[in-house]
Amino acid sequence: MGIERVIYYLSEHPSIVGFRWSHSQSWGSTWSFLVTSVALYILASLTLHLLLCLLLPRRRPIPLGPIPAVHSLAMALLSSTIFVGILLSAAAEIRDTRWFWRRSKTTPFQWLLCFPLGTRPSGRVFFWSYIFYISRFLLLLRTLFSLLRRRSLPTHHLLNHSLLIFMSFLWLEFSQSFQVLAIIFTTLVSTVVYGYRFWTAIGLPSACFPFVLNCQMVLLGCNLICHVGVLTLHLIKGGCNGIGAWGFNSVLNAAILMVFLKFYVKNYKNVNAASESEILAKAKLKDL
């Protein structure tokens, strides 16, 4: 009975089944809201950074107490809910529309990568896509935490979070193909990453390697493989819905990938340098 209730509330509830992306009914669904919110996010981050530099020039970190840990726990729970919800919703959509796919010889995996032409942003999977889009605004708090604790402007946060908001908006606005798998991968990795951040924030031991960065690189690698699959199906099947938005999203994904590759290489070099210094220090102690 408990599992049936979970399935009902995450995939069969009338508000989920009857969801429709609408500029007049869905909060945050207009282009003006999108551009304004991202611009205000960047402006507020820059303003806060300048104020901190002027008022607290010694770059001392500002203690935040349990707030980052609570945020990480909330994001882990939210990401896991979206993950389970879109999995159940995708399974329900496959079950309900399988009869139609037989005519076009479409498999469930092909549908996950390539929506049929004419797909509208309504129904179960688009409800969870909308929740995913709204949840991206909660991630903006990570920039605030970095500004207050590290006292430096995290440009990779500004770029990454802004692009993620744009991409998730385009998924809904143009009923873009591939978004179901993208949300599944992203929420799965986010659940692991934010669970790990909560784990370390409450004082439990951390990994001996850059765990979060490696998880993000795995996610970007999965997305890259799926983008190749979307392009292949688009050429073979004669078209995937929202392919124009997919092309723009591919450019945004490439920009995010370049940022993370640069950050990953820099972090890897720092880890190697620290390891070499530790080895040299141990060797000198042995010589003594």
Image (cartoon, rainbow, N blue to C red):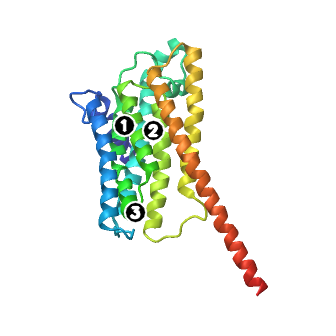
Front: mark 2 or 3: 3
Contact flag, marks 3 and 1 (Cβ < 8 Å) = no
The residue carrying pointer 3 sits among few (fewer than 14), some (14 to 19) or many (20 or more) residues within 10 Å by Cα, namely many
User: Which corner quadrant of the image does residue 198 belong to?
Assistant: bottom left
Distance between the Cα atoms at labels 1 and 2?
9 Å
Residue at the spot x=49%, y=60% of the render? 196
Q: Label 3, label 1: how many angstroms apart (C-alpha)?
A: 35 Å
Q: Position of residue 279 (x, y in %)?
A: 71, 73
What residue is shown at x 42% (from left), y 37% (from top)? 86
**Which of the 4 image quadrants contains residue 120?**
top left
Nearest the camera: 220 or 49? Answer: 49
Nearest the viewer among 274 and 71 is 274
Residue 268 vertical placement versus 182 (above, below): below
Residue at image mark 3: 151
Q: Earlier in the sequence, mark 3 or mark 1?
A: 1
Q: Which amino acid type corresponds to the residue marked 1 in the rendered image?
A: Trp
Question: Which label was assigned to residue 128?
Answer: 1
Q: Is residue 66 visible?
A: yes
Q: Which mark is residue 183?
A: 2
Q: Residue furthest right?
A: 287
Relative to 214, does residue 113 appear above or below in the rendering? above
Circle 2 SS class: helix
Q: Amino acid at mark 3?
A: Arg
Q: Secondary structure at mark 1?
A: helix
Residue 258 at x, y percent in the picture: 56, 42
Residue 228, given in percent of the width and then of the height, sits at 59, 28
Is residue 177 at least partly visible in the picture?
no
How far apart marks 2 and 3 lie (CA) works out to: 32 Å
N-term-proximal mark, 1 vs 2: 1
- Neighbours of disc 1 within 10 Å: few (<14), some (14-19), many (20+): many
